[in-house]
Amino acid sequence: METGLKSIDPSLMVPIRDVVYENLRQAILDGAMQPGERLVEGELSEKLNVSRMPIREAIRKLEAEGLVEHIPRRGVVVKGFSEEDIIEIYTLREALEALAAVQAVRRATREDIRQIEVAMMEVERLASMGDQADPREVFEANHRFSQLIIEACHMPRLIQIVSTYMGYLERFRRVTMGDPSRREVVIREHRMIFQAIKDGDEARAEALTREHVRGGLEAYLRSFRGRGRSSR
């Protein structure tokens, strides 16, 4: 079973169950573990170099999170995302990121603004390279820009919740950012959101953020429907 998982060092200070959980979760969200793939305790235990107990605990957490499911006579398998799941996740993302943008207008420090501006400059530098830019670098630069705005709200609980959903969305966003025309739109929207925050315009920052997230949903659904099947 090729899962993209790496052996875990038992001497780590972090509880093994947490390391196992994060390892499995990331493999699922990255697509290294595909929908329908079975999670077999014995195989995972050997692959990760841990006992079965932390594997079992991690699988329970993943099941509660909706990333895996138990199917009779098959066992635990990776659960894909249906169109309804995608719409729900993006709806939550829209509400949360719009709130973060408003709070960023109210709470961002000068240093926050400076860091966001530096991130925006990097996004635009990569954009100026056109097809010569590494798609992974483009994605990471845009991701960093978004993350800095979220962190500028200075609300730890909100940041944590948004980060959880950003994990779900990473695979979707990589698909949409793979489209050059969508990349151009994203960069333009990011620039406008930054300017609204810099200008202290709460209403505009919120409206632009909502429009940006809805655009991402529409772009992904076009790709999703174009494949003609559910990702379950």
Image (tube, rainbow, N blue to C red):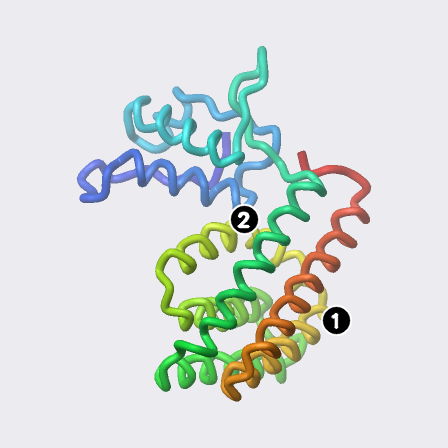
Which of the two residues, 189 or 172, is positioned nearer the viewer here?
189
> Could you classify mark 2 by the number of other residues whose Cα lies within 10 Å: few (under 14), some (14-19), or many (20 or more)?
many
Nearest to N terminus: mark 1 or mark 2? 2
Residue 188 % position (x, y)? 66, 79
Q: Amino acid at mark 2?
A: Tyr
Residue at x-position 59% and y-position 77%: 203
Q: CA distance from mark 1 to mark 2?
A: 23 Å
Image x and y of residue 227, in percent: 79, 45
Question: Can you say whether 107 is above or below 100 in the image?
Answer: below
Which residue is the extreme one toward the top? 73
Residue 125 showing in the rendered view: no
Say which element carries label 1.
Answer: helix
Q: Nearer the viewer, residue 107 or 20?
A: 107
What count of labels does the image hold? 2
Which residue does the image show at 70% across and 41% down from the upper left? 84
Residue at image point 78% right, 54% down: 222
Residue 168 appears left or right of 131: left
When asked about the image quadrant of residue 190, the answer is bottom right
State left or right for residue 58 relative to residue 180.
Answer: left
Q: Is residue 191 visible?
A: yes
Q: Secondary structure at mark 2?
A: helix
Q: Dividing the image into 4 quarters, which one contains the C terminus?
A: top right
Q: Which residue is mark 2?
A: 168
Within the image, what quadrant is residue 195 found in?
bottom right
Q: Where is 193 relative to 74, above or below? A: below
Question: Which amino acid type is shown beneath numbered disc 1?
Answer: Ser
Front-lying residue, 159 or 177:
159
Image location of residue 207, percent across then percent down: 64, 72
Which residue is under mark 1?
181
